[in-house]
Structures are given as C-alpha cells and as structure tokens.
Amino acid sequence: MSTRPVTEDDLHGLVDRRLDASRQAEVEAYLALHPEVAARVAGYRLQRAALREALAPVAEEPLPPGMAIGRLVAARRRPALAGWRAAAAALLMLGLGGAGGWGLHGLAAPAVQEPTQGIAALSQQAADSYAVYASDRERPVELRASSRAELVAWASERLGRPVTPPDLSAAGYRLMGGRVVPTPQGPAAMFMFDNDHGTRLVLLTRGMAVDRDTSMAHHARGAVGAFTWSSEGNGYSLVGALPATALHPLADEVRRQMRKA
Amino acid sequence: MNDMAQLIEPLIPALRRYARALLRDRAAADDLVQDGLERAVGRWHQRRADGSARSWLFAIVHNLAVNRMRQSSRRGPHLPLEAADGVGAGTPAQEQAWQHRDLLRALQALPEEQRSVVLLVSVEDLSYAEVAEALKIPIGTVMSRLSRGRERLRLAMEGAPAAEAAGTPHLRRVK
C-alpha cells in the first residue's frame, strides 16, 4: 500500500511526531498489520512520556541566583567583580540589607564571642538564615512549597532522619518552601513561612551533639527574635521579626507537631 | 544584550534538566549549567548567526557534562546523591516515584552517547537536526543512537535483558 518501505527512522519519527501527515498515515497503517512492531512503538511512546514526567520537576524548580540571566549579564559587564567576588558582594548586601538586628555579627562586633555549640549556636545559625533568606525577595527558598515532597525527601536525606515542615496554617502562616543550609555541625533544614501581611518566619532544624534535650529559650536582637529548643537529639529554632508574645505560641505549636511526628 | 537574555532565559530550566539527567547530582549539574551560562554570555558573539541558539546552548552544557563525567569516571564510580525516594511507602505517588527512579537508573546504564540523544530528543524536544548540530554528529548517527538507546531502555524497563536474542523484529535502517 505504501510506496516507500517503513524504516526504523520512521518509527521514531512517529513517536516524536516528526512525520508529515501522509507519512504518518502510512506508518500507522503498517503498524496495524505488524503488532510486534506496534508494541515496540507503544513501548517507546510510554518511555518518552515517562522520561518527560520523571524529569519535569527539575525544570519547575526555582532557579538558583547564579542562573539569573540579569545577574550573569551584569557580571559580564563588571569583569572586576566576576565570579565568587560578585557572589560574596551580593551576600554582603543581602546580609546588610537584611532584617535588621542581627546584622553581620562576626564583622560588626568582633569582640562578641559567638556561641559555638548547643542551642545558643543553633539560635544564631537560624538567625543567620533568617537574615540572609527571609530578606531575599527573589529566591528566598530553593524548593518551593509546590515541591514539598521533594523538599522533604531532600532534607530527610541530608539530615539522615525524616524531616517534615510543621503546618502553621491555623495561625495564618503558609509554607513557602525551604532548603538545606550548612552549619559547622553539618547540614540543617530550613523552612520558611509567611502570612498575608508578608511576615516571614524561618524554622531551622538539625541534629544536636550538645544540648540534646532542652526546654525552650528565647533570644532576641532588635526586632528579630528566636525561640530555640531541642528534643531527642534534634534541635529547632523558630525566628521571626515578631515580639516574643507572638512568636512563643507559634514555637509551642511547632514543638507540639514535631513531637507528634 | 537584551536580545541575548531573551533567547537564553527561557531555555535555562531545560538546560538544568538536561544536566541533572546526565549527572544525576543536583549540585554538580547546577554548577555546570551556571558555568555553561557564563560561557554562553561571554561567547554570544562567537555563535554562528544561522545556527539555532537552542542547539548552541545545549552543545555548551553537553560538552561540559561529558568532560565532567569523564573526569569522575576516572575517579571511580559516582554515587548519585539524588535519593528522592521520599519517606514512607505505598501511596500511588510513591510507587510512581519508584518507577521513575528505575527508569532514570536504566537511563544511567546507557552509554553516554545514547543517553544524550535519547534525552535531547525525548525530553528536550530538539529536532533530529538540532541534536546533530548540538552534538556535531551526522543525522544518521543521531538516528542510530536514538534507536539503540530507546531499544535498550525499553528492554531494561521490561526486565528482559536477553530479549534482543528473543527475536524482536527490527526494521532495516535506511540512510
């Protein structure tokens, strides 16, 4: 019926929808008569669809700041600030422009001894995450709440235990997303929340070698406060620009949910 | 400059996906794409005006990825960090995640030259001619790699390692 013999290339052309209408009809007619070949083509179609589906989430992830095209082009125009120096400068600006209060503690107040372990250190690290990420209007989180499963899997994998964000919707806070952040004690999971007023909260959690089980402690600098505690070797710190009276019940709720989980 | 940004920007998610699929390591793939984008921005004027921007960008990322894979294969087998297995099991989404994982694992077992072609055609929707341009190979080679890669992947997913010998009918490739 067909003038040209059907080739292997035609089968792929069909799978990839690259054939013109008349050739497509010829190849389909051929497949109708050759069920084994048709089964193979069906397998390729399934495979094509499954590959697209398996890899689709990657293309939906928010872009890391290094891939922002405007930034790449600008970096090109300012060769003196290329590479890591531009990144460092950007971080500095973010830190300085950040939520006020904690600021760049290491540089601004070299005389103050940093807590190096325990929940005081965790509180400081959570405040650092808050200062850098909560002030970021463009990419506050690496994985958004729409990729919650991926975020949970990632954080759980890096922390070596199941890590899930709490649900603070009863208090009007939605999960924005999160990321894994470095600390001297290893990877920590950061989750960020916001409410209808744009108020952002950061929850940081990681394993604790010291202060493995503590009650809740409050730290504050300027407008930014943190409630920090640990339970069964896992530390938690909730940070936000809220008065202690507002932040404390939220921290209690997080602790309650984390215990249950 | 603006023109360049407008052409490059919409392709970044796809470039990331391609690099991630090849390397299966999130951080390494993102580093590589960023490196590729910096090169693309820097060499934009060297691009052939008649060529496709898409092929050109994929070529940059592809070459960086191949170099990287060669380096890491010299350092021994790479353990993918991507353990997006989730926690718990049994939900349909979980099951699908496992299927996807098996598929990506089978993809990983393909020779690199087949894997690239399968990905560029199936996932990134490059035309056969664009793939030939990006990989700097003749279009006939694109087709034969696509054909072998898809068949190997199909057999792997159907759990029939010896099916090649089972006499699945194959059509003659012409050209």
Image (cartoon, coloured by chain):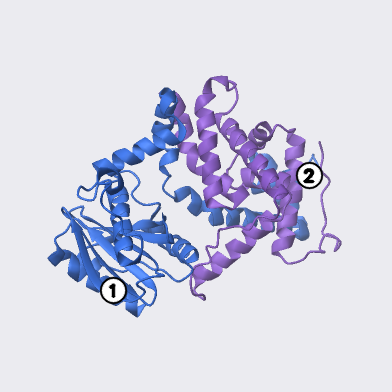
Pointer 1: what residue? A255
Q: Is residue A131 visible?
A: yes
Horizontal and vertical percent for residue A139?
Answer: 35, 46
**Who is closer to the viewer here, A73 or B126?**
A73
Which labelled disc corresponds to residue A7? 2
- Across and down, in percent, residue A70 comes to 39, 32
Q: Amino acid at mark 2?
A: Thr
Chain B colour in the picture: purple
Q: Secondary structure at mark 2?
A: loop
Which tag, 2 or 1, sits closer to the chain's start?
2
The C terminus of chain A sits in image quarter: bottom left
Which chain is blue in the picture? Answer: A
Q: Secondary structure at mark 1?
A: helix
Mark 1 burial class by Cα count in 10 Å: few <14, some 14-19, many 20+: many
Measured Cα–Cα span from mark 2 to mark 1: 64 Å
Q: Nearer the viewer, mark 2 or mark 1?
A: 1
Q: Residue at x 55, y 29 (%)?
A: B53
Q: How many marks?
A: 2
Q: Is residue A26 above or below residue B156?
A: above
Residue located 55% across and 70% down the image:
B95
Residue type highlighted by circle 1:
Arg
Q: Quadrant of the N terminus of chain A?
A: top right
Relative to residue A153, is residue A80 depicted above or below?
A: above
Write down the chain letter for disc 1: A
Of all chains, the one bearing label 2 is A
Measuring from the top left, give residue B27's x and y in whole percent. Answer: 52, 49
